[in-house]
Amino acid sequence: MPRKSPRLLFGILLPLSFIPWILGGDLTTHTAYVVVFYLLLPSLIGRAMGFEWGEMGIALPNGSGWRLFALLFLLSIPVSIYGTTVPSMKEYYPIFEYSGWTDFVLKELLIGLVMLAHEAFFRGFLLFPIARENETLGIILQDIPYTIVHLGKPGIEVPYSFIAGIVFAKMDLKGESFVPSFLLHWLGSVLFDVLCVLL
């Protein structure tokens, strides 16, 4: 297999974007699909092609990454509060049924695993190798499949996910890690689910 070709890596991984989306399943099954197709397989393929972990965004963030995460999380709070006033969003979230607060927490942990795999895939494996050669191209290429996999969710989420995909990518490139977007995506999701339940 040719080594260290960012565009070849992207071309190999791109079809994996849609497999969990096509397969569907309940939360537990979907989590398993996402971990396999967004995390495990890309890790094996990327390493087999000679990419170091850091070259794929798999690293702890630098100071800029932590600061941008904190700032954007604070800014997400009023956006989340507003989101609870959109009927289609309030009806859709949380995406799981739960029997009590313990079950709610366990399912949010599964969502966290889904978010970890999502961000590692789109903002790590698909973004970093190409962005090191051409940042704008890398951001655009990872954002297109990321937006497509949001089709079928409430309509407002499609343009929102397109914008978020750009913001997340810029933040992660500054932070030299996909971790800031993972934390922002997951903790923002948990906050919104809690608000939807309580309000």
Image (cartoon, rainbow, N blue to C red):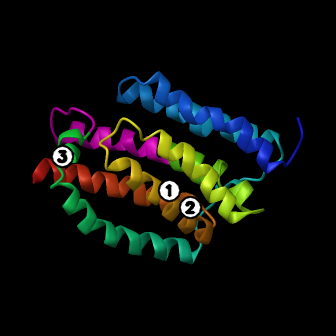
Residue drawn at the location 20% of the way across and 43% of the way down: 88
Real-space CA distance between mark 2 and mark 1, rounded to the nearest whole angstrom: 6 Å
- Quarter of the image with the C terminus in it: bottom left
Instruction: Write the start and end of the magenta stretch as one range.
Output: 95-116
* Callout 2 touching callout 1 (CB < 8 Å): yes
Residue 139, numbered circle: none
Q: Position of residue 184 (x, y in %)?
A: 41, 60
Q: State whether the magenta stretch is mostly helix, strand or loop.
A: helix
Could you tell whether 154 is left or right of 55 in the image? left
| Residue ID for mark 3 | 90
| Residue ID for mark 2 | 169
How many C-alpha atoms fall within 10 Å of the one at disc 3: few (<14), some, or many (≥20)? Answer: some
Residue type at mark 3: give it.
Lys
Q: Residue 40, located in which quarter of the rendered image?
A: top right
Could you tell whether 190 is left or right of 179 in the image? left
| Residue ID for mark 1 | 165
How many C-alpha atoms fall within 10 Å of the one at disc 2: few (<14), some, or many (≥20)? Answer: many
Answer with mark 1 or mark 3, whichever residue precedes in sequence.
Answer: 3
Q: Label 1: state its secondary structure.
A: helix
